[in-house]
Image (cartoon, grey):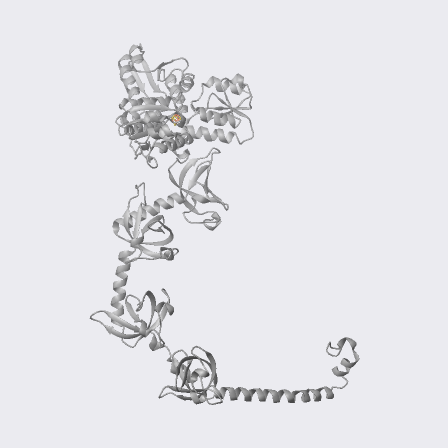
Amino acid sequence: MDSKQAELWSGCSYLQTILANKAGFCAGVRRAFQMTEEAGRDGYSWSTLGPLVHNDEVVQYFANSGIPPVDRLEEIQTAGIIIRTHGVPPDIMAQATALGIQIKDATCPLVARIHEAAQLLIQEDYDIIIFGDTEHPEVKGILGFCQERATVIADADQARVWRGGRKLGLISQTTKDESQFYEVAAVLLPSATEIRVINTICSATRQRQAAARELAQRVDLMLVIGDRNSSNTKTLTMECQKTGVRTWQIQSAADIYPEALTGVDKVGITAGASTPDWIIKEVLDRMMEFGDGAPQEQQEVKPAIENESQETGENAKEENFARMEAEMADLAMPNKGDIVKGIVIQVLDDEVMVDVGGKSEGIIPLREMTTKDANSAKDLVKIGDELEVLVLRWDDDGTILLSKKKVDSKRAMDKLEEDFNAGNMVDGTITGSVKGGLLVDVGVVAFLPASHVEDGYVKNLEDYIGKAYKFNIIEFNRHKKRGSQIVVSRKKLVEEERARQKEEFWASIQEGQTVRGRIKRIVDYGVFIDLGGFEGLLHVSEMDHVRISHPADVVKEGEEIDVYILGLDRDKQRVSLSRKKLLKSPWEIVLEKYSEGDIVDGKVVRIAPFGAFVEIEPGVDGLVHISQLANRRVEKPQDVVSVDQMIKVKILSIDPQEKRIGLSIREVAQDLDDIEVQEYLEQQEQPEQEQELISEDAGGVSAQLQESPEAESPDQE
Ligand code: SF4
């Protein structure tokens, strides 16, 4: 749409489009279409005698496939001829046979029944009135069976001036208006001594007319799609006009111009029996440019049957028509929008072929198999599986494009609607995040607002992606066009679960227990820990035996730790916790780890006139008395050590009762000297031992060293 059109349409964003539930190809046309397509694959060359149906696009489609239309038998350049749905007079058939032309007869079986009815009437000596259009090929075909005893009457006015005979048989072109047919019958009644009326208007026409009439009464504008030469399309247009609604007959989407839609809120769409699905789809797509959301489909309309008795009667021919229509229904392929069952007959990675009972196979592309990610259709179905599928459209090559995904979605929506109405919980998996919340796969995609993820504020929504939960459906509107049709919530469920856990918690908890909890919040004065339904406080002073600057230095949010139940206040519902109680004290560590006489590393933490305090474990200091600072007399400790200096000290004494540790630097020096002397002495002894070893092996390695020039070391040189 260009900017001018967009401007024109700025006020029409709520244009609603409704497609008649009976529109487009009838069973007879679909059958002829399929027969012609099959002919295109059978290796012979074919033409159609006249346009296959009254639709230029269909005719062009087959001409492009090598099956052109010819007007007369003499023009035929192909091996065979296809007789179109309208049928032909018997002499044409005879002529073709005489010329050796192969015949594929796609005459609609309902038209063929009219031929039979005409022959029967002639046999029984009736003159025939055909209610129809003289120039219509179907009527020309019927005339051929009437042995020049038939008259074509176009309307009631012509019937009024017709001078009758003794016995009169009235039949109709299949696509004529039914009410007019009865009007003609009524006009003819006085003009003959006997009149036999056979309603040969086919139900496809009746149904399309009934649906169009019903729809026309509910819209501001009717669009009737069909070729300008199509009789049934003209009849549909006329039926719509009779309701008083503005009616516009178009051949394709290209005929729609926005200006004509100004002021229109609701548009009804119907299509003649020779209009292919792809043209209807193009028109619907075009209308979506002007409207708000996808077109709707008209609810089922029962055809008007006020004259049912006239239709059925006792006439055997009419019974035959009913039977034929039933047979036609069996032959009919599913229509766009139908949900049908099919059996999987082939599975490829990117598509599945399904037998849906007709002559053509249905194809489900991988993208239409499932709402979930899938790499191959082979992971989803196997040959022989029965599937429910939706008919999306007929492709140009005659295959039917199907969707399993849409049926699954529809079924899922039906079930969700039931659950919503019944207040049931549903299972779902969080699949992603969007502005303001999360997306949840509950069979279809639902929206979970951020405020409904938990019973309180959630800091990081991404943490929930990939997790499965139960949900309440808080909003369901399958007709909603903007925003999510399904909104779910965990809030109430989380609240209920918390209440249950809290009750369980207080029933089972005791002071002195050790429990596991998850760090939920860190504050300056401590940590709040989720104990499974209830939160307890671990004060910073209870976190460790040593001083902690901030709780975050020790733990992090989400971490699980063991805690000791220090105190319970059931009235105020408070729980105080301790981590310190579960940790070893520094003195316990010292007693386990160190013994008197050990030399250890430490840090000078404080200096006093009588010595220096040295930390050998976090929270445990020992004293190096001034007399133990060096091997000489020390005036002040600062002459030997300084605060923060790392030094080695020897543990002289450990007094667990008084929690005192005596340390010495002086003795470290002495001990280190002793160790050095010892190591020196050991090294002095070693060459003699080695010498002895060499002597014992005189003919071995040493001998080789002396003999080999390469073995001489650089030192020797
Ligand atoms: S409109 Fe009726 S008679 Fe004509 S082709 Fe279709 S089914 Fe046959």
Point 74% across, 86% down: residue = 697
User: Is residue 398 visible to us here?
Assistant: yes
- Image quadrant for the C terminus? bottom right
Residue in the foreground of this view, choosing between 664 and 237: 664
Give above or below for 356 relative to 538. Answer: above
**Picture quadrant of ligand 1:** top left
Residue 678: where, in percent of width, then height? 58, 89
Residue 253: where, in percent of width, then height? 40, 28
Residue 552: where, in percent of width, then height? 36, 67
Point 37% across, 80% down: residue = 585
Residue 257: where, in percent of width, then height? 36, 25
Residue in the foreground of this view, choosing between 260 and 689: 689
Residue in the foreground of this view, choosing between 56 and 28: 56
User: Is residue 126 visible to us here?
Assistant: no
- Residue 72 is left or right of residue 291, and the answer is right
Q: How many marks?
A: 0
Residue in the foreground of this view, choosing between 397 and 71: 397
Give above or below for 617 relative to 429. Answer: below
Give above or below for 629 relative to 235. Answer: below
- Residue 670 is left or right of residue 154, and the answer is right
Residue occupying the far left of the picture: 571
- Image quadrant for the N terminus? top left
* Res 625 → quadrant: bottom left
* Res 129 → quadrant: top left
Residue occupying the far front of the picture: 635
* Res 165 → quadrant: top left
- Residue 493 is left or right of residue 611, and the answer is left
- Residue 121 is left or right of residue 669, and the answer is left
